[in-house]
Image: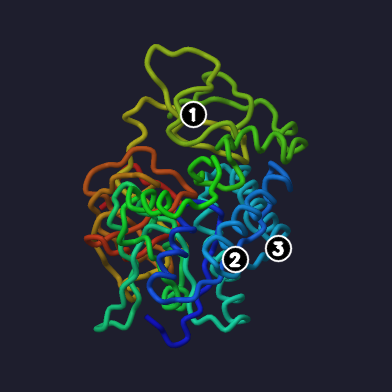
Amino acid sequence: MNRQGNTILVAMSGGVDSSVAAYLLQEDGYSPVGVTFKLWCHEGADHTEKIIQRAQKICKTLGIGHRIVDLENEFKEMVVERFVEDYLSGITPNPCVFCNRQIKWRHLLKLANEIGAPLVATGHYVRIEKNDSTGRFEIIKGVDPGKDQSYVLWQLSQDALSRTKFPLGTKYKSDIKEISDELSLPLGNQKESQDVCFLPDNDYRDFLRRYVPGRIEAISKGELLDEQGNVLGYHDGFHNFTIGQRKGFKMGFSERKYVKQIDARKNQVTISGNDGLFSESMILGNVNWVSSEPREEADGIITIRYNHKGIGCKIHAVEQNRLIVEFSEPQRAVTPGQSAVLYKNDRLILGGIIQKSIEKITK
């Protein structure tokens, strides 16, 4: 099949998913050009170079071109530094969500324009459909429920969605592994990619200690409080805790205690029993409406963290790009800084950043 303007720029990480995505596009009549972004990683230049070399070998095996774009400094400044500042402000961020829009898609589309490619593609497990009645491009969950990645793409603009292909959205992971085996792609013995690419071990505490040692050392011993504000003991720094965490208090209690609230400015951590972690609603900010124009009210199933099963909710607008979300049932450990995504059936309606949990709804 020959397509008019069939050049398509494919983000290549050197992994199974992006490699098979390029192959599937090739089979569908497109002319893929692979691109690998050189991103900053705490493991150093050797680790990054191995990723690039693997992507180059895969592109050569597929018989397609390959580009390298050095985004190391920009990624470090815009994603890594923001990640650090968020944690040191007492919130728990989703760096991949921010990176997808501000780094990956921005540079995918920029390079696509430079080489004359009308479309770009990635190996995400998600689908896109154009709604002819509204004219909007809609994000639909991937058919493989265990691999759906729509949650991390809610910040993408309509322009980006209109120019993006997701060839894995209609596939299961088992299908992709089978295709990869048949092609004998030079993938090496790599592990499944992590959620945060610059944290291969997913240990943010160790990362902070090594990345900003002076700032971490400057965080002194802080107070451990109960829900009434009474001092129960002391901790070694608020940055060691996230909402819902059960360990690390360095003292025993007659019942299990969990982190309920973090006050970075005062270096205080409030703990409670499990019942104290539940919220009836939350405030959502930085909202991006995807499969719908903004409106005053909405309902559906909202996901408040990656792999959260979702809960029914009603949404009310309070001001531009800021919403109140009322859960149909109280939700545990609603965490500021995390993304929350609203679905109607499998369609991603909107996404935003959790700003605040609200324990009780005041009518």
193 in relation to 109, above or below: above
Circle 2 sits in a helix, a strand or a loop, which is it? strand
Circle 3 sits in a helix, a strand or a loop, which is it? strand
State the CA–CA distance, disc 3 to disc 2: 11 Å
Amino acid at dot 2: Val
Specify whether 164 is left or right of 292.
Answer: right
Residue annotated with mark 1: 229
Specify whether 215 is left or right of 3.
Answer: right
241 in relation to 331, above or below: above
Give the image location of residue 359, x and y in percent.
Answer: 34, 42
Location of the N terminus by quadrant is bottom left
In the foreground, 333 or 104? 104
Specify whether 213 is left or right of 100.
Answer: right
Answer with mark 2 or mark 1, whichever residue precedes in sequence: 2
In the image, which is nearer the foreground, mark 1 or mark 3? Answer: 3
Residue annotated with mark 3: 70
Residue annotated with mark 2: 35
Give the image location of residue 83, x and y in percent.
Answer: 61, 49
Amino acid at dot 1: Gly
The structure residue drawn at horizontal position 74% and vertical position 48%, both measured from the top left corner, is 45
